[in-house]
């Protein structure tokens, strides 16, 4: 089977399937402007998985909602460019984005109980999502809904299709949400904290399911989470966010084996290990994430950084930009490469 001509041309031009360029999402409030996302850029190809990690309030979910066009008009000021297979979603009309949503891009929301309508059965909601983009009868759409529920591992799908969301367990609701998101075979799948509040057994099943379905549909996948263990299972590349900006980007091997940013070190140091005995206690990152209304000048992580004294005070005045440190691995930090290498090798890595 040959590739569509537009896809061939896009590949020849070297364009990514999803290309986010200098995305900014600001929310004006009575207290000031909340800079939830403040200049974010990344690319993603089909068949690949990008993990976006960071603490709550770092801008992960706002980024995903911006891509999906789900911010309420008038409440968010969005600038920059988001290209999906060459089409700029930011400059497109709400109707144009709506036609793409569900068909070409879909999202698994963090809390399926609140994301799904409580007054309608799970099957009816999947049927509605499917019929919006496919001119089929209700009977055909219902059969497709049953097939999707069966594909994601829900037992007796022909009966559970008529159940309401509250009649499903947490894991089954998450599976139903995945079935709904994948009902139209989207090219881009965004999973926002897909394993939150699930026990480890169900979490593993959900991750395996996303991985298997990605192989089947060759989708581009974004996993948004604060759990580095989740992205370690799925992600090809990882972007670490802090205070609305990317502070490190690289392959999964880069982030786990050769991390370059003190914040990434902190995330790794606060993650328990089960594969070997740990000789040191988990070390939390001191302090709290900054207010996105009054982000510190210079490096936003400076007030919480244990190594800011090594850069001669630059973190207090100058905001570091993402710079390449080798083979696509990027970091935004004022520490010299020699200092980062020494600290990682001698101080951080032995304690993990």
Image (cartoon, rainbow, N blue to C red):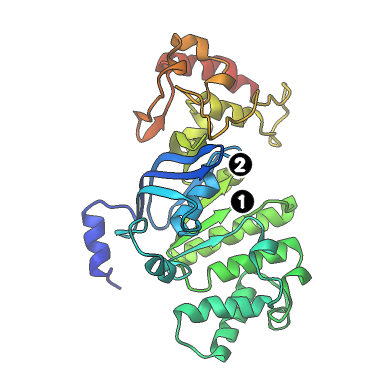
Residue 302's disc is none
Vertical relation: 209 (above or below) 155: above
Check whether the beta carbons of the residues at disc 1 and disc 2 lie within 8 A of each other. yes
Q: Position of residue 340 (x, y in %)?
A: 47, 18
Quarter of the view holding residue 176:
bottom right
Quarter of the view holding residue 231:
top right
Q: Which residue is mark 1?
A: 193
Q: Position of residue 126 (x, y in %)?
A: 59, 76
At 46% from the left and 53% from the top, the residue drawn is 66
At 44% from the left and 23% from the top, the residue drawn is 333
Q: Earlier in the sequence, mark 1 or mark 2?
A: 1
Q: How many marks?
A: 2
Image quarter of the C terminus: top right
Left or right for 287, reference 107: right
Vertical relation: 179 (above or below) 76: below
Vertical relation: 16 (above or below) 239: below
Q: 10 Å neighbourhood of mark 1: few (<14), some, or many (≥20)? A: many
Calculate the distance from the C-alpha at mark 1 to the C-alpha at mark 2.
Answer: 8 Å
Q: Which residue is mark 2?
A: 226
Left or right for 67, reference 303: left
Q: Position of residue 323 (x, y in %)?
A: 35, 28
Q: Position of residue 327 (x, y in %)?
A: 35, 33
Q: 10 Å neighbourhood of mark 2: few (<14), some, or many (≥20)? A: many
Secondary element at tag 1: loop
The extreme front residue here reads 30
């Amino acid at each position: 089977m040959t590739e569509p001509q537009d896809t061939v041309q896009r590949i020849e031009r070297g364009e990514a399937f999803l290309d986010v360029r200098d995305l900014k999402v600001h929310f004006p409030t009575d207290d000031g402007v909340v800079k939830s996302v403040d200049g974010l850029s990344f690319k993603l190809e089909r068949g690949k998985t990008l993990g976006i990690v960071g603490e709550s309030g770092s801008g992960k979910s706002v980024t995903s909602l911006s891509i999906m066009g789900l911010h309420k008009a008038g409440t968010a000021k969005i600038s920059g460019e988001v290209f999906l297979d060459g089409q700029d979603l930011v400059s497109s009309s709400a109707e144009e984005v709506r036609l793409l949503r569900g068909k070409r891009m879909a999202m698994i929301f963090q809390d399926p109980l609140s994301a799904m309508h409580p007054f309608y059965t799970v099957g009816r909601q999947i049927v509605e999502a499917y019929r919006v983009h496919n001119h089929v009868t209700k009977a055909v759409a219902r059969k497709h809904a049953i097939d999707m529920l069966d594909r994601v591992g829900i037992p007796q799908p022909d009966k559970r299709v008529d159940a309401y969301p509250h009649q499903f367990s947490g894991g089954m609701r998450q599976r139903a949400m995945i079935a709904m998101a994948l009902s139209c075979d989207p090219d881009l799948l965004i999973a926002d904290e897909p394993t939150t509040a699930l026990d480890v057994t169900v979490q593993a099943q959900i991750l395996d399911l996303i991985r298997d379905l990605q192989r089947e549909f060759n989708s581009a996948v974004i996993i948004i989470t604060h759990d580095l263990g989740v992205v370690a299972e799925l992600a090809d590349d990882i972007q670490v966010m802090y205070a609305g900006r990317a502070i490190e980007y690289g392959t999964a091997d880069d982030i786990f084996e050769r991390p370059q940013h003190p914040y990434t070190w902190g995330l790794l140091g606060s993650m328990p290990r089960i594969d070997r005995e740990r000789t040191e206690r988990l070390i939390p990152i001191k302090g709290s994430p900054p207010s996105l209304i009054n982000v510190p000048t210079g490096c936003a992580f400076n007030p919480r950084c244990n190594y800011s004294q090594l850069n001669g005070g630059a973190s207090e005045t100058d905001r570091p930009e993402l710079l390449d440190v080798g083979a696509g691995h990027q970091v935004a930090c004022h520490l010299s490469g020699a200092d980062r290498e020494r600290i990682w090798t001698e101080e951080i890595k032995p304690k993990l």
